[in-house]
Amino acid sequence: MQTRTLLRSSIRPAGPRAMLHGLLISLALGLGIAPALADTSTDPITPSEAPQAGSIIQSPNDHRAYRAVTLDNGLEALLISDPQADKAAAAMDVSVGSDYDPKDMPGLAHFLEHMLFLGTQGYPDPDGYQRFINQNGGSHNAFTADQDTNFFFDVDPGAFPEALDRFAQFFISPQFNPAYVDRERHAVNSEYQARRDDDSRRLAEALGKAFNPAHPVNHFSVGNLDTLNSDKRPLRQALIDFYQAHYGANVMHLVLLSPEPLDVMADQVEARFSAIPDRGLSRPTIDQPLTTPGELPAAMRVKTHEARQRVEFLFPIPDPIEDYATKPDDYLANLLGHEGEGSLLAALRKAGWADALSAGTRNADGSHALFDVSISLTEAGAKQIDRIQASLFDQIARIRQHGLNAWRYDEQARLAQQGFRFQQRSEPIDAVSGMAMSLAYYPLTDVQYAPYRMDGFDADAVDELLSRLTPNNLLRVYSGPEVDGERRTRYFDTPYTLTRLSQWPAAQTLSGLALPEPNPYIAQDLSLETFDEAPPRQLVDAPSVEIWHQADSHFGAPRVEWRFSLQNPDASKDARHAALTELLAGWLNDGLNERFYPAALAGQDFSAYAHGRGITLAFSGWRDHQSRLMQTVVEQLEQGEITDASVARVKQGLIRSWQNAPQDAVYQQMQRTLGEALIRPQASTPNLLAAMRTLDANDLRTYRHQFLSQLFVQAMAVGNLDAERARREGLQVANALAPALHADDIEPLAVAAVPETPPRLHPETARDDFAVLRYLQGGDRSLASQARLAIIGQLIGPPFFAKLRTDEQLGYIVNAGYAPLLDGPGLALLVQSPSASTRKIDERMDAFLKTFDQRIASLGDEELAPYRQAVRRELLTRDQSLGERAGRLWQALAYTDVDFQRRQHLAAQVAKVTAADVKRAWQALRERAPLSISAAPGATPSDIDALTSGFGQLPAQ
């Protein structure tokens, strides 16, 4: 796989408003949504040919209006007018990040990011910004990267002017309230503690020990109580000094997206952001080299918490950012990261040594970067690293001798241009955040086009890059749980051993390596058919087959999203069958990997995934040639050889994933436990793991026959194809599968009801944090109940965060909100803490709920109105892409009563909710016992399946 890392690593937020809501819905539905690949086209687009706004190159599929403005203070802003936008959004990128922390205060840039949210001169309330954004249907967050700090929000368009005013004050008049400096310092420390066991952070700190000690790659970027204190100088003054030294209008880039006309937006920017001081700043640079003489070659071994083994081959190179228009690093990454026949990964998989490989650029700092070839190893592969390394250099030599071909570059460029031509929209908040950072690195002309731009093959640049990929310029990093390190890192306590080498041991290379052939899957027919908008309709309603279809031309791409749900009544009847279903889906993906990788590069994606009722086959790609891939998948499923080697490889991957579940972030473990407790049918992760260990290839061969002999097939096509073609292609798949069961033979997905005296559940966790998730379930699944709890979820989030996170500092991860499971309404209250016991968290939750009782008791219709409107507008937000629409419509089929207008009907219910309705709903919630899930170091894990097997179903009314 080719990986493209545009910029730097970052300290990203623990989760936006959807941390509970979105994850739980996805988990609950069991049908899932297969990701759609970037859209593509055949005809190249040059800067002179592309539609432009001013000097901004736009996709032909992007009909928004753009304008770039520069204020008198030097602030550069990009304005995007989109009359169809349901949300307005803004982002500010500041050209300073953790790489520029003072040496005596690591983590200060990240700490400053936190502090800017806690009150300004114009809006001094530390919780006022969050409360306003939430009240008006929005979300907000920020992240600190190595060289940038990025702030962003979205909100209902009517509230955008005031939201902008509040946002602008971050960069004009932050208070740095002394009362909150120490509190937020503890919040940063809680974030550090919550991430202290993350292997990615532990590996990153160890990696720095191999390089120049003076380079920021060795820098501790998060901050904790030891680094953020007033021992050397007053902490508040350090914040002010850093802010004044690095935050100025001419190192900031602002992006706004709104339904308003450009002239109105320009006036808003002028009125609100002109007061940002012009301090005459320029973007800082890194003046220390990444490596110094004598540091390479070197080998490093690092201990991980997770039971996974990986080797990374890291080569220092010049930062390729200046070559973004020709992308020599992408060209090379595409060849080394290829997964098709003859590739390095294909040879490693055949030998039983690896199951995944990626290549690309990382840790770029403006002057230096690392080219990384990362390989996920099997246990056998961990013993063959020298041979794997020799095979890598053999493939590099092959590229140097035979792989510098203009036709290969042209093929990549053609696919990139296809992607740009049919570019799909992202959510407004994601669009502004990404473009604000792009403005800091690319010319205005290329702020959208840069990732796709490939102007011409520069063989010399590729050859220069290849000259850096040598044994003498290599840091080899092996990581695994069995490593015994000679040293430990300071902040993440990572055991590691670093060995400087003069040469590498000789080893034999693998045979069968080759370079990719021309890609046969590139779509030829990219004509766009035009359809009138219409709701999905059922094309086939046979006893054993349902096929649904919605024709689409709204998103401007000749693409189709197909889903086939192969449903079997025994797919999850117990843990063993659920594990076999997972193994069958994994085997299908594994067996098609080499064959389908070129198709994936060409924009044809496929994945099979298991769920509670069977396996879904998900296809996302161009209309042209898609049916051929669909037939190939069915042939493999029915007739493909199930070898011992392939089953062992897939089995090891699943075991590794489930075995590592206790290492997941604690809040994720809590959410997973909630879903396993209340969604039917489903088996818990520990029981799946135990069952998987007993299975072999013979079991899967037997199960495949049993699974395919008892099927009901439900399918849907959404995209740029007509009903006749959808019916024909859908029936080709369905008829080949020959389903024999009826819909009534399949157990429907269901939500279990929390009993009157529920057990307290404990996930199996290897983390040291404490956490409590309290789930307040609605009494039934009616739209009225869903509407009322959704509004309460909007009401409860900000005060819960303000009290338990900002004021009481229980932990960094504090969240409350609406968290439905399927159509079962509920509220989830979550706190994860590095120090507060579960008893203390429970006590503080109880105290908060008593205070919130009073808030609800005094609630009037006037106060309720903006929260109700925020929920309603969120429900009526339009789909941003074809993949998003397909996912929403496919999810609708998960319910027993199929309703593609469910969101609209729920929005209508929300509009009717009164304060009296909310009070009654809240009282009913408080009278029912919540389901509590808690995690604590050393706690005995619960058998979730056994403790919840007696739960009844949540009633419909």
Image (cartoon, grey):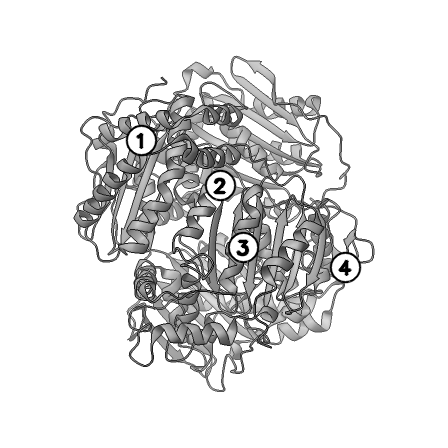
What residue is drawn where x is 17% and y is 47%? 839
What residue is drawn where x is 28% and y is 79%? 231
Q: Which residue is mark 3?
A: 165
The nearer-to-camera label among 1 and 4 is 4
Q: Earlier in the sequence, mark 2 or mark 3?
A: 2
For the residues labelled 1 and 4, the Cα–Cα distance comes to 53 Å
Amino acid type of the residue that numbered disc 3 sits on in the rendered structure: Asp
From the top left corner, tell me how far across and down residue 194 is, in percent.
31, 58
For the residues labelled 3 and 1, the Cα–Cα distance comes to 43 Å
Tell me the element at label 1.
helix
Q: Earlier in the sequence, mark 1 or mark 4?
A: 4
Q: Nearer the viewer, residue 127 or 233?
A: 127
Amino acid type of the residue that numbered disc 1 sits on in the rendered structure: Leu
**Contact, CB < 8 Å: mark 2 with mark 4?**
no
Q: Which residue is mark 4?
A: 55
Q: Which residue is mark 2?
A: 137
Q: Earlier in the sequence, mark 3 or mark 1?
A: 3
Quadrant location, the C terminus? top left
Amino acid type of the residue that numbered disc 2 sits on in the rendered structure: Gly
